[in-house]
Image: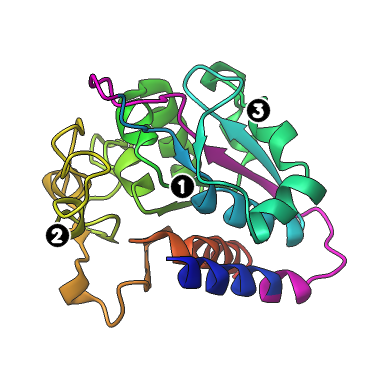
Amino acid sequence: MKKEIIIAGIICLLFSACNPNPLEKGKILMIVSNTEDMGDPEKHFAGNNLWEVAPPYHIFVSHGYEVDFLSPTGAKVPFSMDPMGISSYTIKYENFNEKVENSMTPDLVDYTEYEAVFIGGGYGPLFDVTYDEKILTLIAKIYENGGIVGGCGHGPGAFANVKLSNGEYMVKGKKVTGFPNSTEVTKSWAKEGTLLPIMLEDQLRENGALFQSKDDLNDKHDVVIDQRIVSTMFLPSSAIVAKEMILQMED
């Protein structure tokens, strides 16, 4: 795991080095969870995974984009994992903490201001963002306004329920990936998935997504792009999702 995180950090630094003097290009909305635990007696941590939020944030701001954070109830949000590598850098030098600790509520967001929306991993978004109608509507409006939607790990599960103005799910008929069942059932983090309100893969499939499993990909860390939806299974590729979103926006 540490080796993968170091690799992800190197990728981040390489991306930012290509753009040492960024100019502001537009705004990106990053969505995070306010849910701290899974509601069980042992209080398994839900929250947000720092390594799936801070590196993408770094990629966006180092390429000249302004980033705002949105959460269901606003203000400070819980994170797992200690800062290290590029996460430490973006916290110290790129205003990450001040931004994320003052996350907005949905009522404060004007969807027309944003070119893209990103949801990182951690289990938290499955517990609140997935069911927040105001946030789901904002994602739909940004997407229908030509925006890009990106997610990493459990993040794609949080936009699985987004419905477009025609009543169809946003993910219907599109290739999407995220933290797969085959891995979920082997991990104790959510008691092999038994503590979760949804299994991410099941929810995406149920709503018509063409879920990309490990068998469908050349490498489990591949990024999947289809009709302005950018997704990946695991945290080492979170920064690559952000970079691919930028390439989509600037195409």
The region drawn magenta spans 14-42
**Residue at left 23%, top 40%?**
168
Cα distance in 3D space between marks 2 and 3: 34 Å
Q: Is residue 39 magenta?
A: yes
Name the residue nearer the viewer: 94 or 41. Answer: 41
- Tell me the element at label 2: helix
Task: Locate residue 137 relative to residue 25 in the image: left or right.
Answer: left
Cα distance in 3D space between marks 2 and 1: 20 Å
Task: Locate residue 38 relative to residue 209 in the image: left or right.
Answer: right
Task: Say which quarter of the image contains residue 55.
Answer: bottom right
Relative to 20, say whether 197 is above or below. above
Task: Say which quarter of the image contains residue 213.
Answer: bottom left
Q: Earlier in the sequence, mark 2 or mark 3?
A: 3
Cα distance in 3D space between marks 1 and 3: 16 Å
Name the residue nearer the viewer: 172 or 239. Answer: 239
Location of residue 187 in the rendering, given as x and y in whole percent from the top left corner? 21, 51
Which residue in the protein does label 2 denote? 182
**Residue at left 55%, top 63%?**
239
If the image is split into quadrants, where does the N terminus sit?
Answer: bottom left
Q: Is residue 84 magenta?
A: no
Relative to 186, say whether 100 is above or below. above
Relative to 215, say whether 122 is above or below. above
Name the residue nearer the viewer: 142 or 240. Answer: 240
Q: Residue lying farthest bottom?
A: 218
**Residue at left 59%, top 61%?**
249
Determine which of the numbered discs, if any, sits on residue 101 in the image. Answer: 3
Q: Does the residue at mark 1 contact the one at mark 3 (Cβ under 8 Å)? A: no
**Amino acid type, mark 1:** Gly
If the image is split into quadrants, where does the C terminus sit?
Answer: bottom right
- Tell me the element at label 1: loop
